[in-house]
């Protein structure tokens, strides 16, 4: 399985999908897809690191909490992230995200993501790997 992310159309919002061999890989791809809504992740330097912890009752709620924690950090720090290391055990996510302050000229942000939603929300293992997806409000 090739780990990757993709966007899918959804009315006025944007769908994100992360695919990976593990749940952690799919959640990492979702984080990259989130950055890619705003700018090209390849243009974001993985400089400073921050730690993020999330806990939820199930995988779907954990995905929403993870994305909303990243959105919160992006908004309050005026940051973008491009590298992620995360571990999930018993619906507890511990992550480190690396990024840098937004540079308007270099990053040319397209939109601001307001939050992850429950629309099209799913985290599944299809036997070949993990698929995580949801729609984000822009």
Image (cartoon, rainbow, N blue to C red):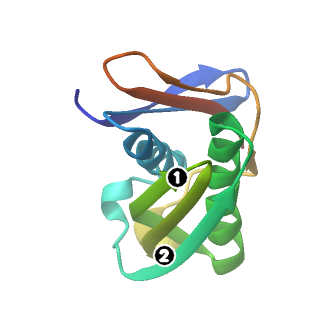
**Disc 1 residue crowd, few under 14, some 14–19, many 20+, Cα 10 Å:** few
4 sits left or right of 96 in the view: left
Camera-nearest residue between 15 and 49: 49
Q: Give the vertical position of 13 relative to 89 (above or below).
A: above
Which numbered disc, 1 or 2, marks the residue closer to the eye?
Answer: 1
Callout 2 secondary element: loop
Q: Are marks 1 and 2 in contact (CB under 8 Å)?
A: no
The residue shown at (62%, 53%) is 66
> Which residue, as the protein is rendered here, is positioned at the far top?
126
Residue 74: x %, y % from top left: 62, 68
The reply to whether residue 15 is visible in this rendering is no
Callout 1 secondary element: strand
Residue 126: x %, y % from top left: 42, 16
Q: Quadrant of residue 26?
A: top left
> Which residue, as the protein is rendered here, is positioned at the far left?
2
* Separation (CA) of disc 1 from disc 2: 35 Å
The residue shown at (49%, 61%) is 108
Q: Give the vertical position of 74 relative to 122 (above or below).
A: below
87 sits left or right of 43 in the view: right
The residue shown at (74%, 26%) is 119
**Disc 2 residue crowd, few under 14, some 14–19, many 20+, Cα 10 Å:** few
Camera-nearest residue between 122 and 120: 122
Question: What residue is pinned by disc 1?
Answer: 89
Q: Where, quadrant-wise, is the C terminus in this rendering?
A: top right
110 sits left or right of 73 in the view: left
Question: What residue is pinned by disc 2?
Answer: 103
The reply to whether residue 3 is visible in this rendering is yes
Q: Give the vertical position of 14 relative to 70 (above or below).
A: above
């Amino acid at each position: 399985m090739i780990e990757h992310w993709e966007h899918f159309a959804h009315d006025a919002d944007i769908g994100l999908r992360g695919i990976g061999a593990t749940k952690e890989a799919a959640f990492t791809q979702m984080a990259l897809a989130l950055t890619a809504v705003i700018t090209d992740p390849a243009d974001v330097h993985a400089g400073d690191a921050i730690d993020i912890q999330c806990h939820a009752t199930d995988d779907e709620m954990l995905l929403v909490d993870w994305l909303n924690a990243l959105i919160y950090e992006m908004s309050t720090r005026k940051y973008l992230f491009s590298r992620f290391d995360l571990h999930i055990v018993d619906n507890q996510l511990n992550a480190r995200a690396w990024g840098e302050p937004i540079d308007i000229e270099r990053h040319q942000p397209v939109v601001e993501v307001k939050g992850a939603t429950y629309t099209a929300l799913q985290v599944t293992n299809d036997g070949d790997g993990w698929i995580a997806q949801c729609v984000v409000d822009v």
